[in-house]
Amino acid sequence: MKSRGLEKIKLGVISWFAVGLIPLMMFTACVEEQKLEELVQQAEPEKTENETEEPAVALPGLPDDVAGYERWLKLNVEPIPPVQGGDPHNGDKNVYVNQTRDVIAPNDEQEYPYPDGSIVVKEATRPNKDYIGLIAIMRKKAGSDPDHNDWEFIEYTRNDPDKEFTVLASGRICWGCHVRVENTDYVFTELE
């Protein structure tokens, strides 16, 4: 009889473990799984507005260092219309720079000169066209042209959306015009 009582106690203890311990173990496993999910989410870098899954590819005929320029900081808010009476970059224009707002306007006011390594890209959609027909690029490379704040200028055009861009002008032709805005580091468009 004593042995039967002991068996009942053992069964009671085992039942208590089965009823209490198994749900406790399941709860603990769920909590651990949730913590693991939270850690994974924290470890994954958040994507910003400008990030996309696809790598940037330069437009045909343009150098690779301007690939994805459309994701860079845009200097103008609205497209810049053609200048009446003559516009070397004729068309509706947008201007981008490979710098952040914090770098070129740390106190919310643009500062000059642009840092070494800056690349400014101006795109233009020609009048009565629906594709980009002009790309003008300024690259700031230390020591490349001290007389013009070390900017290198080059302009590309195309006359068909399925064609590659080809070089139209560079060097003196470009800086001859840009010298008028030497006070804004040779860049016509200021950050808006």
Image (cartoon, rainbow, N blue to C red):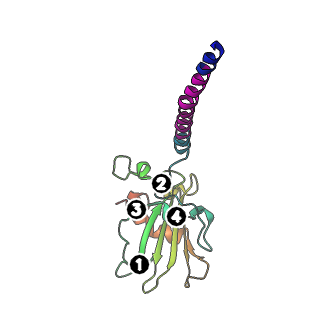
Q: Which residue type carries mark 1?
A: Asp
SS at badge 4: helix
Q: Is residue 34 magenta?
A: yes
Q: CA distance from mark 4 to mark 3?
A: 12 Å
Q: Position of residue 62 (x, y in %)?
A: 60, 70
Front residue of 107/52: it is 52
**Quick one: label 4 or label 1, which is nearer the N terminus?**
4
Mark 4–mark 3 contact, CB under 8 Å? no
Question: Along the polypeptide, which appears first: circle 1 or circle 2?
Answer: 2
Give the magenta range. Answer: 10-35
Task: Estimate the spatial distance between the alpha carbons at disc 1 and disc 2, rounded to whole Å.
Answer: 36 Å
Q: Position of residue 33 (x, y in %)?
A: 56, 40
Q: Which residue is mark 1?
A: 87
Q: Is residue 9 above or below residue 180?
A: above
Residue 190 lies in what quarter of the image? Answer: bottom left
Q: Which of the labelled discs sits on residue 131, or is there none?
A: none
Task: Determine which residue is flagged by label 3.
Answer: 75
Q: CA distance from mark 1 to mark 3?
A: 19 Å
**Residue at which label 2 appears:** 48
**What residue does disc 4 label?**
69
Identify the element where label 3 is drawn.
Answer: loop
